[in-house]
Image (spheres, coloured by chain):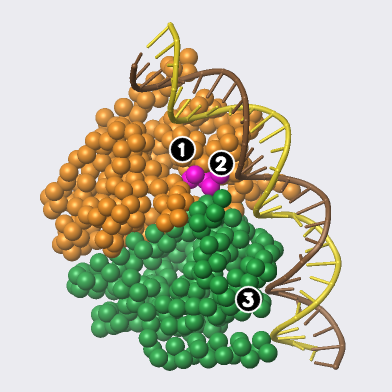
Chain colours: A green, B orange, C brown, D yellow
Amino acid sequence: MSQVVAQSVSSQVANATHAGHISVHSTQGFDPELIREHVQIFRRRLEPGQYVYRTGQPFHSLFFVRVGSVKMCELADDGREQVTAFRLQGEIVGAESIGLATYSCDVIALETSEVWELPYPPVLTACLRIPDLHSRLTAALAQEIRRGRSWMLALGTLTAEQRVAAFLLDLAARYQALGFSGSHFILRMCRADIASYLALKHETVSRALGHLADTNSIDVERREIRILDHAELRRVSSPSTQVH
Amino acid sequence: MSQVVAQSVSSQVANATHAGHISVHSTQGFDPELIREHVQIFRRRLEPGQYVYRTGQPFHSLFFVRVGSVKMCELADDGREQVTAFRLQGEIVGAESIGLATYSCDVIALETSEVWELPYPPVLTACLRIPDLHSRLTAALAQEIRRGRSWMLALGTLTAEQRVAAFLLDLAARYQALGFSGSHFILRMCRADIASYLALKHETVSRALGHLADTNSIDVERREIRILDHAELRRVSSPSTQVH
DNA sequence: AATGGCTGTTACAAACTGTTACCGATCGTT
DNA sequence: AACGATCGGTAACAGTTTGTAACAGCCATT
């Protein structure tokens, strides 16, 4: 039965994708359509686990996630590593490496995906020609800074269960903005990736999901998530809203 | 006696400041000198605790920290707040709010400081006129994203003592890049601010500093820090370097 | 259909961090 | 010089998160 449900979800995905309606909201208005005439765009198809780019490879392009989703992994010299972002379709990756000779992180497809490669020097040139494009790119970069800061705040101030709740709400909002269901979706990443992103252990993520399910806030079936009570999830993820 | 030492440090600060040599490295080359002729710059003097700008105020300018240091504080709707960055002289604040109608965080002076206000619309215009400036601003924004990511990695993978060690090393490197001593400096922020930034409680910061002092890695006298053993500090802050 | 590998779940004990409380030091003010 | 407020340090105790381990479910391969 869960098989059937999962399929119904993927058909939603297919529908929305075929509608060709990519939310520009999620990229702060940086839309590849705007530079189509000025920059040659290369399309690349990716299977789960394939790299969009790797740390240390020469920086040459930004990438627009057209279909699917990717994870971004930061890695330190001493071997530590962490997932620092998940990017869904309609979002940009690669901007963090602007100004460097080589990419500063790994980007890996979570599912079968398609990215549009936007060679950076041409993008830069186009920005000078199209004043609007410049401010859009700058705004997209600034938004990326804010997303990081905002997530730092979450990591620094929320407990394990609160982080998991906040993570689900964030994903739900982004799926909804894309035209998918905001209360029923499939996690494209494994527990270990979620845990890494939330600065927890994967067992702790499991336990938190289990507890949220026990309290009927959500329904969990491995990677399939149903949000049963948005209000309760928000309450859980916002400590100050609690009654003392 | 500690009084004397503290004074010797502040004279170092005074010296380097008077030398007028602001590192462009720390701003990825975004230097206010470059736009002097295109943008009218306003100078502002700040006393400790004063705001450079507040969350919700209309966004209008970037700020270049000319003298002193500031903290950046993120605050959530539900009241949670966290210090998300410390900026020393030669660094830029305000870039995270580009593209928004209002500033997205608080910036507060930690000591007597001077900031140069750079009205943003003129900066943007100047970027279109000076191609080089555009790439410098973009690069500065990208660097800000990477700094955030890199700190997220630290928060997510390091223990309390490792974070404190990493924090001290980061400060040391930045002071050294500015021409100050990298092994003897004064913390401009209180323990609570450090704790907030490191996602710890201030008691834990105290314990960690105490333990680092016990092992002769550093010397602590309230806000005065001497790094006695850089190598040991690096070892502490890099888990994988440990021998099993 | 059976196997092995990977992923996810749960229980229990241990470790680290947070909490609370108190004390001393410093600084600005009266 | 005395005062209060803020800041910093220490300690005992409580709590959450983690580590370890065992088990179950899914999937690809044989």
Answer whether residue B50 is visible to the viewer in this image: yes
Instruction: Indicate left or right for A78 with B132 as reference.
Output: right
Sequence order check, earlier mark of 2 and 1: 1
* Most frequent secondary structure within the magenta stretch: helix
The part of the chain drawn in magenta is: B196-200
**At 42% from the left edge and 62% from the top edge, which residue is drawn?**
A147
Q: Residues within 10 Å of mark 2 (few under 14, many from 20)?
A: some
Foreground residue among A106 and D21: D21
**At 34% from the left edge and 45% from the top edge, which residue is drawn?**
B107
Identify the secondary structure beneath mark 1. Answer: helix
Q: Which residue is mark 3?
A: A219
**At 50% from the left edge and 35% from the top edge, which residue is drawn?**
B191
Chain designation of label 1: B
Residue B135 point in image, percent of width and height: 28, 61
Q: Which mark is residue A29?
A: none
Residue A32 point in image, percent of width and height: 32, 79
The vertical placement of A20 against B218, above or below, is below
Foreground residue among A29 and B18: A29
Chain designation of label 2: B
Q: Which of the image's four quarters has the N terminus of chain A?
A: bottom right
Q: Nearer the viewer, mark 2 or mark 1?
A: 2
Foreground residue among A217 and A222: A217
Q: Which residue is mark 1?
A: B172
Instruction: Indicate left or right for C19 with B127 as reference.
Output: right
The vertical placement of B231 against B25, above or below, is above
Identify the secondary structure beneath mark 3. Answer: strand
Amino acid on which disc 1 is placed: Ala
Amino acid on which disc 2 is placed: Lys
Q: Which residue is mark 2?
A: B201
